Amino acid sequence: MKSIRTLLTLLMAGAIGLFHAQAFAQTIKIGVINTYSGPNASLGDIMDKGMKLYMKQNEKRLPPGVKIELVIRDDGGANPDKAKQLAQELIVRDKVQILTGLIWTPNAAAIAPLATEAKLPVVIMNAGTSSITTMSPYFARVSFTLWQSSFPTGTWAAKKYKRAYIAVSDFGPGIDAENAFEKAFRDGGGEIVGKVRIPLANPDFVPFIQRAKDAKPEVLFAFIPAGPQATQIMKAYNDLGLAKSGVKFIGPGDLTPDDELPNMGDAPLGVYTVHHYSAASTRPANKSFIAAWKKEYGEKSTPSFMSVGAWDGMDAIYQLIIDQKGKIDGDQSMISLRGYKNANSPRGPISIDPLTRDIVQNEYLREVRKVGGKLANVEIETVATAIKDPWKEINKK
């Protein structure tokens, strides 16, 4: 009898332990809308790697018993109807508690009403049009705005050049880049001798860059989505001989993304960009990030600013989970995000502006140089420290 009672006691203790483990175990479902197919699939891949590397490196930061499940969906590119459909399914069917990813401005804009209605926190890891965070009180952005990089570019360029031509992709971020650069360049005494907007889908850059050459500017400012298009526009600039004719090429960091530099030959040598991140940075946090990246994905793999946007996005998500001890509430999540700070991001110190829910960060002037026989975006100076989105600052009511 004694042995039977002992066995029953052990079984009951095990059952109670199992009950408590199940009671305190919790899986937080994070919906990811990203680009995994189509001509810009490389952008989704590099962002996906950043998210998953962060999760692998920081699993122990989560509260006890809390697990994360990524529910991943492919938007195929800039496709707002598809993005809206995916967001609806993630919210209604998959019951996600957080949304993230979002490379493209039109896709982010399409899901804004859904996030507001569901009171669902959305951490934007890339889409860079300034107005995005005004579309929903449940949006917070950890990436960048094009005004943050393009406005300081215009200020810097006006000190060196008098005549500029502007070429941008014809969608929200491109229009922001155009407006920001033009305002700063004109304010600095420069003249815009021409500008053109290039179709986003399947562009042939040659005729547009030829127009720029014909206008005989001192400098060409351009924005295109980072990825294969950056290599294509760099090839057009090189093949049409703009560098030989004395036209300098400048822009935000999308023009010379770190992961695309190996595909560009020597064409980008000497190109100046202003951006918030470079894989070549010697900041200790970035050196650690690069070492972890190379260990996980191989020595030939290089992260980009989109990888860092994903890394920092996951850091912000982990922080809101920690702040709420794993019990996710939409409004409490936004309180956490509005107070988010990280002094040791690979890009340098960052925070979220509590008023606009937008990123605050440094912007660096970079030049493409050869380092150890390979092209690199070498940071020369910090041209803006802890800069808020200039568009929002200029348009304050």
Image (cartoon, grey):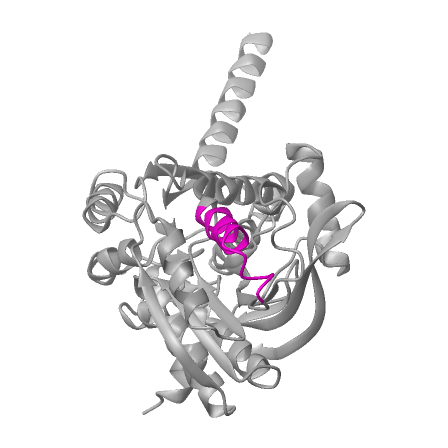
Against 12, residue 368 (above or below) is below
Q: Please indicate, yes or no, whether residue 389 appears anywhere in the rendered image.
A: no
x and y percentages locating residue 183 in the rendered image: 42, 85
State yes or no: residue 264 in magenta: no
Residue 94: image quadrant is top left
Q: Residue furthest right?
A: 372
Q: Quadrant of the C terminus?
A: bottom left
x and y percentages locating residue 147 in the rendered image: 44, 74
Against 274, residue 117 (above or below) is above
Against 71, residue 250 (above or below) is below
Q: How many marks?
A: 0
Residue 111: image quadrant is bottom left
Q: Main secondary structure of the magenta part?
A: helix
Q: Quadrant of the N terminus?
A: top right
Against 180, residue 78 (above or below) is above
Left or right: residue 397 versus residue 185 is left
Q: Please indicate, yes or no, whether residue 76 appears anywhere in the rendered image.
A: yes
Give whichever of 7, 395 is nearer the camera.
395
Give whichever of 378, 296 is nearer the camera.
378
User: Residue at left 55%, top 45%?
Assistant: 50
User: Residue at left 63%, top 44%?
Assistant: 265
Give whichever of 62, 16 is nearer the camera.
62
Please provide the residue range marked out in magenta: 229-245
State yes or no: residue 234 in magenta: yes
Give whichever of 163, 228 is nearer the camera.
163
x and y percentages locating residue 71 in the rendered image: 37, 37
x and y percentages locating residue 267 in the rendered image: 61, 51
